[in-house]
Image: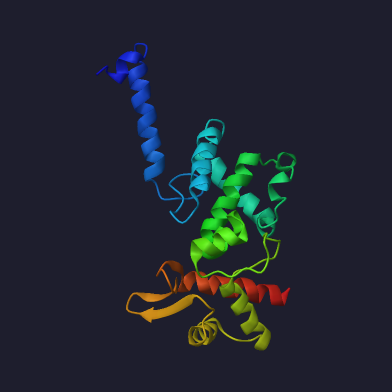
Amino acid sequence: MMDDKKTFAPGAGEDYEAILREKQRRVSMLYDGVMGQLPEWMPRRVRLEFTATRTRILKTHTHADLLEAISNVIDAHGERFGDEDYLKFEFNSKGFSFDIAVLARMKKAVELGPVDGLGLMTDQEHAKRATEGEKFLNNHRKLGTVGPIRKAITGAFKKNPTIKNPDIWKLLAANSPRGFTFHDNPQGKYIEIYKTGRLVMKIGRFYNLCGEERKKLEE
């Protein structure tokens, strides 16, 4: 068999190996929005898009610059990520490229977890089949659509605006949204999808959701 290195010009073998090492380095790092890998619950097409987008944008931006830009996009447009027109916005006028906009939405989806995150990246029916615990009323995602956990948290605040985070957990654990199971054991407190046992979120993320919904009431 012909040695792959012999198909390159002199010195190209070293360049090829350097490229491979860099690809391996990017994949082996912890996911941060640029480096690392998207979780397995993300659709394959999204994971492939992430890799292609990262490869393309790292040719013109540094890792640090990208992290800062992604953070800026999430801060400025995070509440609009569910809008189907999100990626049609002119980010260049704000100093953001289309590729950064794509990476920012992916990062936000990962932060939301498999239920709300899939709903952000895909149509509702896809998310429902993928999570087996999600229930959507519309055929297409609309701005403001939320998952059942967040919806239940909002309902708890409507009944008692001063309720504390631990009490919200106890309330939902006693009457959990359909398709979800709340756990409190030596491994910690976390929520799983009932049928598959897939982790949805840990207590920290749950409290963050509570804080986000509480802030909305205070605004």
Q: Nearer the viewer, residue 194 or 88?
A: 194
- In this rendering, the count of numbered labels is 0
Rendered residue at 36%/38% (across/down): 24
**The C terminus sits in image quarter:** bottom right
Location of residue 81 in the rendering, given as x and y in whole percent from the top left corner: 66, 55
Rendered residue at 53%/47% (across/down): 46
Q: Residue furthest left?
A: 1
Coloured how? rainbow
Location of residue 180 in the rendering, given as x and y in whole percent from the top left corner: 48, 75
56 w.r.t. 29: above or below: above
Q: Nearer the viewer, residue 137 or 33?
A: 137
Q: Is residue 62 left or right of residue 37?
A: right
Quarter of the rendering containing residue 187 = bottom left
Q: Residue furthest top?
A: 10
Q: Nearer the viewer, residue 49 or 125?
A: 125
Q: Is residue 121 left or right of residue 205?
A: right
Rendered residue at 52%/39% (across/down): 54
Residue 114 in view in this figure: no
Residue 211 in view in this figure: yes
56 w.r.t. 136: above or below: above
Quarter of the rendering containing residue 192 = bottom left
119 w.r.t. 28: above or below: below
Location of residue 21 in the rendering, given as x and y in whole percent from the top left corner: 35, 33
Rendered residue at 44%/54% (across/down): 39
Q: Is residue 74 left or right of residue 36?
A: right
